[in-house]
Image (tube, rainbow, N blue to C red):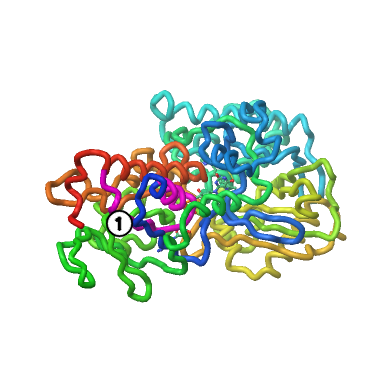
């Protein structure tokens, strides 16, 4: 087997790191990771803030069980606490909902909603979502005229709430509005109307009670990076163009022929046999026409365009002392005038904070200090990114004062705001199956180029990994990690078969 192929990995997030680490382990020593920013980890980004370590990007291991590759790697590196390692913890089924803990549902003015009513709303909502996934599993036709998750939820609500007295119905619909906002933060979409009803079931939920990494999510990518020699990484090097299908030519007096050339900002050209692209879908959407020469095949472009990529952000606020109930882990914000059936206000800029489904209490305070985190997704989240910290602080203070009914709450002493849409090399948070897309688009995105085998043409010139290329686990760290391994395996397999005769001469 030949292991002297030159491999360039574009992007040093968990997908790129996983691929590099595996390829190095299998003897591919001529390897380089080229990363646009000054750090490894990508959307896994932990930072010190106040008393603790906070996550700007990925938060939880979703479905921490032995089937979850991130769980296994974190466990092997000793990065998990005792609770996460408990066998019973790995068996809990949460159906993809992060475990935020006990919630309080509040109205403006501070009034708390009746627990029984909330329970009935929550179980109804969970049932409807469960049913929405059945279309994917069974392949049965969609209800006439309904193609999105929100469309389906609304149709089910008409039926389920038809006998409710008007007042009860109105408040339940307001709670359902909040649930749909929460769903947007989970899927990372602007509206659940943008999420495809049939494709929604494609995402595979693993068992396990979602857990965090006590030393920060980045402790995982830091550990994985320890296995990649420093000489294999170029930071602060944005790639501007990937030239593939190169004609045989001489490069720098070297007689070896390479099929791919990675052109970096500033003009540096790096030649390779294989380039693994782990760039986020948000960046591909905006830059794919300039990023590849020749351009991507039409089918790949369609997949890039059809799959969804929007924004989910967090607003951390540190306070001198807590003003919240110590048993409350999440304050869910219900606006009584909202309903999934009301037309959305397109001029949301004046009241962007309404999109925030809730405010999480970071727990325990010994680890985090007195910190709250507001979660907000979609266009309102992208608009929030354009505001100054003090504008966001002021709006958050008004929101907190209103929903606690306490006009004396002091302003947070420190803020930390994620701004994923403005991140030039991510341009959003993570992918989702947008209306009209399907798992086939995800598979298309993951297919290496050139497609098909031609004599004398180097196979696997441009390969693709990253969260958006994983059919079952897109949008997650474990999906990204597995996609990196998948592409490493593809190369390892390629060089373990007689196909290696197609490799260029060295
Ligand atoms: C998870 C979680 N989590 C919250 C928020 C975010 C994400 N995720 P990377 O981007 O890491 O790396 C690519 C690199 O490429 C990067 O370093 C770039 O700088 C570089 N690059 C780009 N352009 C370049 C160029 N031109 N040249 C060179 N380099 C270039 N995942 O498991 N648990 O709690 C969360 C969350 C706010 C932003 C998350 C979470 C997503 C993960 O962070 C993400 O998938 C991976 O880190 C991506 O790694 P990568 O290597 O692919 O790219 C039913 C149903 C619905 C389905 N969804 C349900 C699941 C919900 C997912 N949950 C997310 C929620 C949170 C809170």
Q: Is residue 14 above or below residue 260?
A: above
Image position of 432 with respect to 388: above or below: above
The question of residue 53 being in magenta is answered with no
Q: Is residue 237 shown left or right of residue 350?
A: left
Using the rendered image of the protein, determine whether residue 468 is visible from the camera's viewpoint. no
On the image, the x and y values in percent for residue 71 come to: 57, 38
Q: Magenta stretch?
A: 1-22
Q: Nearer the viewer, residue 169 or 232?
A: 232
* Left or right of 183 on screen, residue 296: left
Residue 140 versus residue 1: which sits nearer the camera?
A: 1
- Identify the residue at horizontal 63%, vertical 42% (top origin): 78
Within 10 Å of the Cα at label 1, are there few (<14), some (14-19), or many (20+) other Cα atoms?
some
Residue 356 in picture, x, y percent from top left: 65, 52
**What residue is disc 1 on?**
6
Closer-to-camera residue (66/199): 66
- Is residue 13 shown in magenta? yes
Residue occupying image coordinates x 37% and y 45% = 26
Q: How many marks?
A: 1
Horizontally, is 57 left or right of 266 in the view?
Answer: right
């Amino acid at each position: 087997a030949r292991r002297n192929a030159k491999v360039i990995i574009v992007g040093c997030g968990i997908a790129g790191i996983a691929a590099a680490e595996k390829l190095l382990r299998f003897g591919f020593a001529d390897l380089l990771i080229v990363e646009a920013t000054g750090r490894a980890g990508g959307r896994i980004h932990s930072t010190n803030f106040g008393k603790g370590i906070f996550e700007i990007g990925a938060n939880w291991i979703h479905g921490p069980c032995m089937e979850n590759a991130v769980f296994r790697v974190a466990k092997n590196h000793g990065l998990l606490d005792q609770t996460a390692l408990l066998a019973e913890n790995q068996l809990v089924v949460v159906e993809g909902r992060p475990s935020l803990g006990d919630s309080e549902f509040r109205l403006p003015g501070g009034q708390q909603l009746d627990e029984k009513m909330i329970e009935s709303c929550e179980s109804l909502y969970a049932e409807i979502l469960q049913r929405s996934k059945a279309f994917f599993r069974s392949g049965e036709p969609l209800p006439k005229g309904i193609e999105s998750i929100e469309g389906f939820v609304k149709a089910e609500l008409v039926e389920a709430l038809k006998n409710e007295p008007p007042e009860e119905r109105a408040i339940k619909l307001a709670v359902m509005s909040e649930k749909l906002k929460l769903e947007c933060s989970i899927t990372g979409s602007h509206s659940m109307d943008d999420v495809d009803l049939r494709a929604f079931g494609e995402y595979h939920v693993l068992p396990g009670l979602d857990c965090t990494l006590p030393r920060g999510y980045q402790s995982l990518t830091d550990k994985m990076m320890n296995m990649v020699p420093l000489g294999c990484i170029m930071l602060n090097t944005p790639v501007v163009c990937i030239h593939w299908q190169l004609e045989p030519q001489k490069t720098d007096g070297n007689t070896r022929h390479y099929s791919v050339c990675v052109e970096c900002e500033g003009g540096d050209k790096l030649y390779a046999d294989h380039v693994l692209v782990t760039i986020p879908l948000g960046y591909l959407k905006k830059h794919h026409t300039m990023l590849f020469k020749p351009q991507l095949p039409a089918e790949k472009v369609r997949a890039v365009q059809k799959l969804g990529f929007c924004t989910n952000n967090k607003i951390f606020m540190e306070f001198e002392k807590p003003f919240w109930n110590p048993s409350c882990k999440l304050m869910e914000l219900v606006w009584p005038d909202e309903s999934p059936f009301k037309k959305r206000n397109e001029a949301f800029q004046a009241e962007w904070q309404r999109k925030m489904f809730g405010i999480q209490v970071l727990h325990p305070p010994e680890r985090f200090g007195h910190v709250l985190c507001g979660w907000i997704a979609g266009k309102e989240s992208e608009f929030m990114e354009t505001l100054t910290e003090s504008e966001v602080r002021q709006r958050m203070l008004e929101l907190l004062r209103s929903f606690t009914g306490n006009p004396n709450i002091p302003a947070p002493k420190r803020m930390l705001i994620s701004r994923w849409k403005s991140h030039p090399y991510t341009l959003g948070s993570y992918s989702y199956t947008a209306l009209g897309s399907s798992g086939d688009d995800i598979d298309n995105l993951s297919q290496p180029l050139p497609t098909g085998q031609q004599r004398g043409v180097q196979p696997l010139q441009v390969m693709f990994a990253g969260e958006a290329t994983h059919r079952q686990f897109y949008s997650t760290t474990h999906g990204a990690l597995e996609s990196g391994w998948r592409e490493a395996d593809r190369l390892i397999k390629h060089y373990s078969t007689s196909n290696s005769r197609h490799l260029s001469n060295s």
